[in-house]
Image (cartoon, helix red, strand yellow):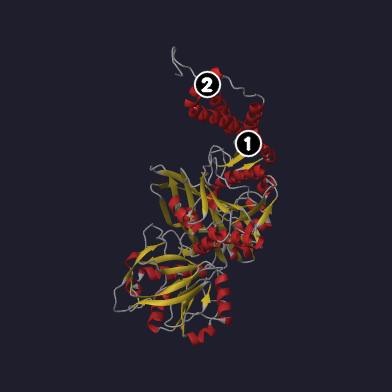
Amino acid sequence: MSFLQPLLLAGLPLVALPIIIHLINRQRHRTLPWGAMMFLLAAKRMTRGMARLRFWLIMLMRMLAIATLIFAVARPLSTGWLGLSVGGQADTTVILLDRSASMEQQDLQTRQSKRGAALARLGELIDSLGDRTQIVLIENTANQAQSVASAAALLELPEATPTATTADLPAMLMTALDHLVANQAGRTDVWVCSDQRASDWNAEDGRWETIRQGFARLEAVRFYLLSFPERARDNVSVRVTSARQRSAAQQRELVLDLVLRRESAQAGPLNLPVQFIINGARSVVNVEITGDELVLQGHTIPLDQSLEAGWGRVELPGDENAVDNVCYFTFSQPAPRRTTIIAENQPAGEILRLAAAAPLEPDVSYETKVLPPDRAGEIDWDTVSLLLWQAPLPEGLLASQLESHVAGGRPVIFFPPEDGGDTELFGLAWGDWHGGSDGPFVSVASWRGDSDLLAHSQSGQPLSVGQLRTYRYREVRGTGGPLARLEGGLPLLTRATTADGPAYFCATLPDASHSSFAQDGVSLYVMIQRALELGAATQGNARQVDAGSAPAREAAQWEMISHDGGEVLLSARPYSAGVFQDGERWVALNRPAAEDSAPVLDSGQVDRLFGGLDYRLVEQSIGRTSSLASEIWRVFVSLMGLALVAEAWLCLPERRPAGTVTHS
């Protein structure tokens, strides 16, 4: 609890006034012995216990009335509810602001978004705290701590505006932890503003254990999750999954694959006009969504024969989230899919070569090269789209080249070597081997089907990951985000979270002595082809990248051709959807796919993430206008009134029935 006028609390010693006045009054009367009073004194002794209790209750009520009056005039504050911030005024208040695309969900009546509602409530909180605490803001794009002078400054910061990005809450909490340790911040309140999307929180991320241990070592740190978990009542998102050219019947045409996802409490069909804009030319197609998802594959749009490259966007009518109503795309001649495989296990290398060389698109060239570990220096880093590495993790120059390869948006998938495990790369390293080729197999317990390499197909069907049998596998140690886990908890496929791009560690090999990857075929093929397509997308003249990624920051320096909303600051370009051009190169920036369909963590899952820390959940809704910090002096005035009424009742003379004898 805090106070707007804390100096007035110096008057609390005045609660002793009733006792002082009583003692003074006792000194004003002298006692004279009188024989006729002996019988009355004897009767008074019989009721002395009840009278004494009554006296002290009267004194207590008078003291309580004075105390509550002093508290009321000191103007006490309560954040969220009475007692939320009991424990004293914080020296530092850290705000972790989630600016991801899903935070732009709006209340259709007030047009206020989740992000806007969070800022409004935090602004009121800053106003109430005044200059008695240092305000620090950490938002998800830059992930850096910056001071905020006032509520007005918070609302006007460019770092508080909408983005088309996703958030990384573990990384933001790590930044907050580093800031508090470096600045010896003292008593601290940490406000986490989020909609609890699972993709933003990465509950399976290994960094959570480090976060809990780090904050547990600090004294007087309290966490408040300002949460907006409500889902949209009726919202549809659109995403272009593929944009390619082809020649047909002496003409060229653009072929688009779309996914429309609906988040709604209504079960009925929805008719929706979908608008296509290609280099400024518009066309409209009416579709009907009967379920949660509609996949529109092979939608063709005629192109001019002279047009070899260009851009476009797909638009939906306005609904609860304007950010996911638009998706940009670019197109040009497709880049060759080139895969290089470094393998010490020849059978495993051959299986990987077959999975990478099988063409997924007939009009695209596929090239595959298999090299032993001692020839890794022959890798053509400028042209390779995907690197599959089944050998001890590299060090020195090779490691630096591989890090640059990943930072450019081109994936690498590591498979376990037979020996070697001391080297760490991208925050991960190989651990011990488990199982054997002649032992019982281990099944896959869970995997992420909402995004990344093991996501469900465009039709919504899950991959056959659950049918995989793993006989021999190796631990993956370090900080990473598991995409699939085996029974027993060890990860089967992990994405490195410390890498600047897509780096994956697969705990087993695809040959028959290690797993059923080769027999199943589908999961391995889809996983490698998705990674290959992801890498090739960074090499052609037309690319689609996630807003906020390293390629987005590079492309944001180019000429802006189209974008959402009004004027976009140069510093905000990497985090906004749009199209950029540099000569023959085109890049479309869009929100990450995880922002369209990520589930929401429940309160139990959040409790486990903050286990052992001083943590409170403050659930809010967009339309609610309640303040996080409000004056509660009325509560103390009411308590004072109750105390005075009780004191008056206790002071009433005791009534006795007529003829009652009080002494013998």
Dot 2, crowdedness within 10 Å: few (<14), some or many (≥20)? few
Q: Amino acid at mark 2?
A: Met
Q: Residue at x 46, y 45 (%)?
A: 272
The percent coordinates of residue 367 (x first, y second) are 47, 77
Query: Residue pushed farthest front?
Result: 35
Q: Amino acid at mark 1?
A: Phe
> In the image, which is nearer the foreground, mark 1 or mark 2?
2
Distance between mark 1 and mark 2 Cα atoms? 47 Å
Q: Quadrant of the N terminus?
A: top right
Q: Nearer the viewer, residue 508 or 654?
A: 654
The percent coordinates of residue 293 (x first, y second) are 41, 52
393 with respect to 347 (left or right): right
Q: Which mark is residue 71?
A: 1
Q: Nearer the viewer, residue 89 or 309?
A: 89
3 lies above or below 481: above
The percent coordinates of residue 515 (x first, y second) are 34, 74
641 with respect to 593 (left or right): right
Q: Would you name the residue on which mark 2 appears?
A: 38
